[in-house]
Image: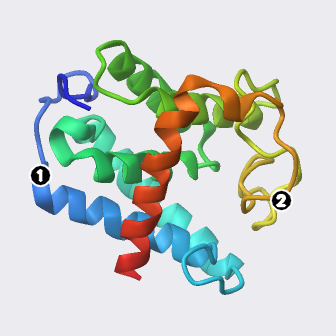
Amino acid sequence: MTGPAVHRPAAGRPASGPSGPALAAELLARAARDQQVRGRLDKSPPDYQRWREVDADNLAWLKRHVADHGWPGPARVGELAASAAWLLVQHADHDWQFQRDCLRLLRDGMARQAVPVWQVVFLADRVFASAGAAQPFGTQRETAAPGPAGSGPAGSGPAGSGPRHGARADRQPWWDQATPALTALRAALADRS
């Protein structure tokens, strides 16, 4: 997706900072660890203690980066690494406020056609689910999270862990964008494990 950079740093901070290959590599490495501890790359059982540690480390790092440099969108880090950043915030369930703040950044980017719609859709549902509200798009699972207690809203479980809240989620136009993007991300992360 082309378009203007997607970032809005904290007030008084420059809209610059790490970008390009180094930041993309960091995002992809963090996303690979995220998926590894969830057992999604090698089908191993999830390690819940390590899961919590990885999520906490990723959350702290991403919060610092976003506060100092803004959202790492596709113009700064490429499509794949921007999807990795989305995955990290998607799993930042211990900080609902940060997820909500990032959702605002992604919505701003989507309005400028700098962020794919599917990223906003999935994160919006995650934020709504975390708040105990109905999901507008139905992308998150309804069953209890299989991860550590308090690790996320219903929906943080593996695919097939329960019905989605919204029978029409897979029939929306943004779903056609999400499927190849998520497939490419998963393949790239599997190569890193």
Q: Secondary structure at mark 2?
A: loop
Q: Earlier in the sequence, mark 1 or mark 2?
A: 1
For disc 1, the marked residue is 20
Q: What's the residue type where badge 2 is placed? A: Ser
Q: What's the residue type where badge 1 is placed? A: Gly
Q: Residue furthest top?
A: 111
Q: Nearer the viewer, mark 1 or mark 2?
A: 2
Q: Residue at x 71, y 84 (%)?
A: 45
From the image, which quarter does the C terminus lie in? bottom left
Estimate how packed mark 1 is, as few (under 14), some (14 to 19) or many (20 or more) residues with alpha carbons within 10 Å: some
- State how far apart marks 1 and 2 are (Cα): 36 Å
Numbered label tally = 2
Q: Could you tell me residue 182's position as x and y percent?
A: 48, 52
Q: Could you tell me residue 44's position as x and y percent?
A: 66, 86
From the image, which quarter does the N terminus lie in? top left
Q: Could you tell me residue 93's position as x and y percent?
A: 64, 48
Q: Secondary structure at mark 1?
A: helix
Q: Is residue 161 above or below residue 172?
A: below
Q: Residue at x 43, y 47 (%)?
A: 181
For disc 2, the marked residue is 161
Q: Is residue 180 above or below residue 187?
A: above
Describe residue 177's horizontal placement relative to residue 192 as left or right. right
Q: Is residue 171 above or below residue 185?
A: above
Locate residue 15: give its quadrant. Answer: top left
